[in-house]
Image (cartoon, rainbow, N blue to C red):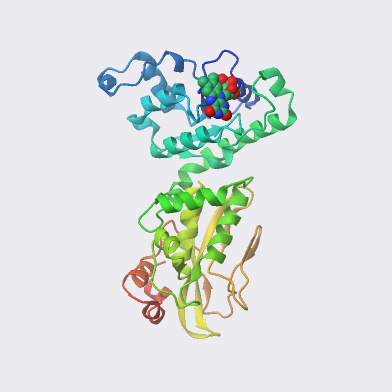
Amino acid sequence: MKILALSGSLRAVSINSAVLRVVKQLAPASIEVGLFSGLGDLPLYNPDLENAPPAVALQLRNEVASADALLIASPEYAHGVTGTIKNALDWLVAFEGFVDKPVVVLNASPRAHHADAALRETLVTMSATLIEVASIALPLPSANIGGAELLAMPEIVSLLTGVLTKIQRRVKLLPDMKSFLGCSVYIDSQHPAIVAQAAKLAEGCADEEAIAKRCFEFVRDEIKHSWDYRLNPVTCKASEVLIHGTGYCYAKSHLLAALLRANGIPAALCYQRLTLDGDQPPYCLHGLNAVYLPQHGWYRIDARGNKPGVNADFCPPLEKLAFPIVNSFEQDLPDIHAEPLTAVIKALTEHQTVEQVYQNLPDVAATEQ
Ligand SMILES: Cc1cc2nc3c(=O)[nH]c(=O)nc-3n(C[C@H](O)[C@H](O)[C@H](O)COP(=O)(O)O)c2cc1C
C-alpha cells in the first residue's frame, strides 16, 4: 500500500514535516510512505494553466493518483490553512484522480483548530474520503521538536503506528464498504444539517466506536418515534427526521445511517419481520441498523426508541435490540442493505399522516428480499 504524505509547512525544521518523516520511519514493510517534496515549487494555481500544467503539478497529480491514501499534516497560519497546502489542493480540485481519495489529516498543534476544520471542509468539498478514525490531533508539548525526539515519545509512536494501521485497514475495506458510506436521496449524509449534527456528536470521541455509540444514543433518545408520540409529519429522508425530530423506526434508521456515514463509519439498514402486537398476525417490517466497527465487524443496533418493555442499547459485541423474535413467523431478515427497501419508501412517502402509515405498514410479503 502506498501513502503520499503532504506537509503544509516549508520550514526546514517544520514539526509537521518531522511528524510525516516519523510516520515513514514507523511504516511496516507493507506500507510505502512517500513525502512529496515539491509543494514549495508549485506555482500559484491559475485555472488558465490547466491546458498545460507545469511539470511539478503533473508530478503531484501522478503521485496522488498512484497513492492509496494521502496523509496531510499542516500548520495553522492566522486561523487558516497555510497557502502551501491550499495551493496544492487547488491544483487537485479539477483533477479526477483526487475524487474519493482516502485522506487522513494529522494536527500537530491541537490548539490550532481553525485550520484543521477548514482543511476538512475543503477536502470534503473536493470529494475526498476523509478517514476520520485515523485523523487525529497529536498531544505534542511544543513545536520545536525533531524526529529523534518524536521517536523517543512512546505515546506519539503508538498514536502514529495506530494511524498507519487504521489507514491500512480502512483502505482495504473501502471497495467493499463504498455503498455503505455513500450519500443518497434518503440517506442524505451530506445534507448540511446532517453534517453539522454528525460533527457535533463526534466531538471529543476517542474512536469510531465512541462516535457510533453517541450517534445511536442521539437517534434513540432525542428523536421521537412517530407512533409512540403520534407525531406528524411523516418523515423518510434522514435530514427530514433530524429537522422534525421524529420518525418511524425505518426513518430513524435512515437518520442513524446518515449520521454514521457522515462520520465516515460504514452503516447499513436491516430489517426484522415482527407481529404488530403480541404474537398474532398481522406482521410488518421493523427497521434497524448495522454499523461496521473495526473491532467487531457488522454490529446490529436498534434506535427506534426505548419504552417500558423495550430496552435497546449499544454494547458491542453484545447485541441488544428492541424486539426479540417470539414465534416462527417472525424473522430476523439476514441481509444488510445500503439503501432502504422499496416497500419502506412507499409506506413513508405515499401516506400523509402517521395514522395512515400505521394502517399501511410495509410487510415482507410485499418486499423482495
Ligand atoms: C505566519 C504564522 C501564523 C501563525 N498563525 C497561527 C495561528 O493562527 N494559530 C496557531 O495556533 N498557530 C499559529 N502559528 C504557529 C504555527 O502554526 C506553529 O508554529 C506550527 O507548529 C508551525 O508548523 P511547522 O513547524 O510545521 O512549520 C503561526 C505561525 C506562523 C509562522
Image x and y of residue 233, in percent? 38, 71
Identity of the residue furthest to the front in this view: 78
Please give the name of the residue rendered at 36% of the width and 77% of the height, measured from the top-left corner: 353
Which residue: 49% across, 76% down?
229
Which residue: 62% across, 78% down?
308
Question: Taking 37 as reference, is 185 above or below it?
Answer: below
Say whether residue 237 is left or right of residue 308.
left
**Ligand 1 position by quadrant:** top right
| Above or below for 237 versus 75 | below
Residue 286 appears in the picture as rendered: yes
| Residue 103 percent location from the top left of the image | 49, 34
Along the line of sight, the residue nearer the viewer: 353 or 157: 353
| Foreground of the two, 203 or 65 | 203
Where residue 197 appears, as percent x and y from the top left, is 49, 53
User: Is residue 147 rendered to the left or right of residue 274?
Assistant: right
* Residue shown at 65% from the left, 25% from the top: 26
Q: Nearer the viewer, residue 158 or 180?
A: 158
Residue 305: x %, y % from top left: 55, 70
Q: Quadrant of the C terminus?
A: bottom left
